[in-house]
Image (tube, helix red, strand yellow):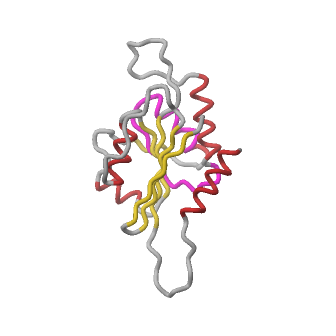
Amino acid sequence: MKYVVLLSIFLLSLTSSAQSTGSKQPETTTYFFIRHAEKDLSNPENRNPELTKEGKNRAENWAKMLADVPVDMVYSTDYIRTKKTAEPIAKSKNLEVILYNPKNLNSPDFQKNTKGKITVIVGHSNTTPSFVNKIIGKKKYHSIDEKIYGKVFIINITGDVITDTLLRFN
């Protein structure tokens, strides 16, 4: 619950209050980037493992954390661990999980489809920071340590202004 309150306060602080100036306010695009939840490491040969029990719980908690956020789209890479992390979020919003190729980050189609929307993107320890860096236009974030699963990168784009924030939940 404390995460929902913190996230709500954070989102409200990013939202500019619209005043009646007669001019149209630029639309805002918001991205929530998360790494997949804890994966089963019992078989080092398995390149596409399931989530652990802890990972399933974390995936459910991401959905709870985003419960009051009007998410428009949920993206995931085509791996079991990312899809299983994205599914509770998508299900809670009555959305389908959209698959994306982590080798084709921030494509013109992705930009067009997500413009003015609130989008959740589930990726990996290396692709998530890379994707964030592509959107913000600078190499600010590095790969996530393999033991860390609780980071969320939040990007807001309003006109030419891009803001990014990194939050960590245990």
How many labels were placed on the picture?
0
Give the magenta range: 67-90
The answer to whether residue 131 is magenta is no
Residue 79, compared with residue 97, is above or below; it is: above
Q: Position of residue 18 (x, y in %)?
A: 56, 76
Residue at 60%, 54% (x, y): give it: 69
Name of the residue lying farthest toward the right? 1
Q: Position of residue 102 (x, y in %)?
A: 33, 39
Query: Which quarter shows the C terminus?
Result: top right
Q: Position of residue 93 (x, y in %)?
A: 59, 49
**Relative depth, front residue between 165 and 46:** 165
Query: Which quarter shows the N terminus?
Result: top right
**Relative depth, front residue between 125 and 13:** 13
Residue at 29%, 51% (x, y): give it: 107
Residue 24, compared with residue 54, is above or below; it is: below
Q: Position of residue 91 (x, y in %)?
A: 58, 43
34 left or right of 100 in image: right
Residue at 35%, 57% (x, y): give it: 111
132 left or right of 25 in image: left
The answer to whether residue 88 is magenta is yes
Residue at 54%, 38% (x, y): give it: 87
Name of the residue lying farthest toward the bottom? 22
Q: Image quadrant of residue 159? A: bottom left
125 left or right of 94 in image: left
**Relative depth, front residue between 27 and 125:** 125
Name of the residue lying farthest toward the front? 140
Residue 70, compared with residue 132, is above or below; it is: below
